[in-house]
Amino acid sequence: MAQGGPPLITDDTATVEKGHWEINIATTIERRRDATEQEVPLLDINYGLSKTLQLKFEVPYLRVKDADESAKMGLGNSNVGMRWRFFEDESKGVAISTYPQLEFNNPTSSARRGLVDRGAQLLLPVEVTHKLSLLEVNEEFGYLVKQHRMDELIYGIAFGRQVSKRLELLGEIHGNALRNFKENELLFNLGGRYGLTKHFTLLFSSGRSFRRASTGEPTLILYAGTQLNF
């Protein structure tokens, strides 16, 4: 069955097989009315520690272009995490996991130059996966603790279907809101995965905010990359 995770924002409960690696290498774009941010590339490395545990390390190289300013480039924040699937009932097709992730500044000038926010942030989410007829549904809810800014709530629901031996089609609705609910964003995203070989898969998705560009929310989010499994 299809899964959440790259190229989607919403994660799922699936872990990399024990002793195996999953490496995603991608280019991403997020365009807003007054700025465009690109990850060129985004490196996402995952390792299966056991049947229910997965380790992750992620870091991007950023290109940020604000309106009326020249583009700035530099190393983005590092992100380390561990996914733990602590409940699974295969007979009912239900699984639950948690995926704590810590994002922190690297010892570069990126925070001082405004490429990334200063300080660390900790994401504490819960993911639920269940089968619904021909679809697999992944739901994620979490709390994002920020060191120097207001905390946020994150939420998402993703749908996937294996339409052929090689192709999975995916879709999601994903949002985030400040803790006081005075600001929020809501996005939709469509994409898929196409398996070229047992070890090599193409990843792609594209979406945008439900709201108009004048709100400052994303008018384009794009993910294009490859996944290596070995």
Image (spheres, rainbow, N blue to C red):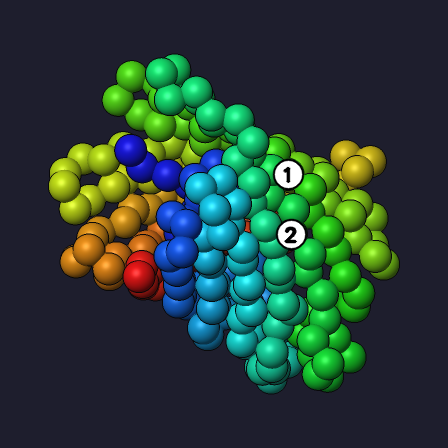
Mark 1, secondary structure of its residue: strand
Q: Which mark is residue 103?
A: none
Residue 156 in view of the camera: no
Q: Decide which of 220, 177 is in the foreground and name it.
A: 177
Residue at the far right: name it. 148
Identify the residue position indicated by label 1 in the image. 125
**CA gap, disc 2 to disc 1?**
9 Å
Q: From the top left corner, tell me how far across and down residue 47 is, in percent.
A: 46, 57
User: What type is the residue that disc 2 sits on?
Assistant: Gln
**Residue bearing the label numbered 2:** 101
Q: Is residue 121 left or right of residue 59?
A: right
Q: Quadrant of the C terminus?
A: bottom left
Rendered residue at 62%/62% (across/down): 79
Is 11 placed above or below 116 here? above
- Relative image position of residue 174 (x, y in whole percent): 53, 38
What secondary structure is found at the residue carrying circle 2?
strand
Residue contact at pointers 2 and 1, CB within 8 angstroms: yes
Residue 147, visible in the rendered structure: yes
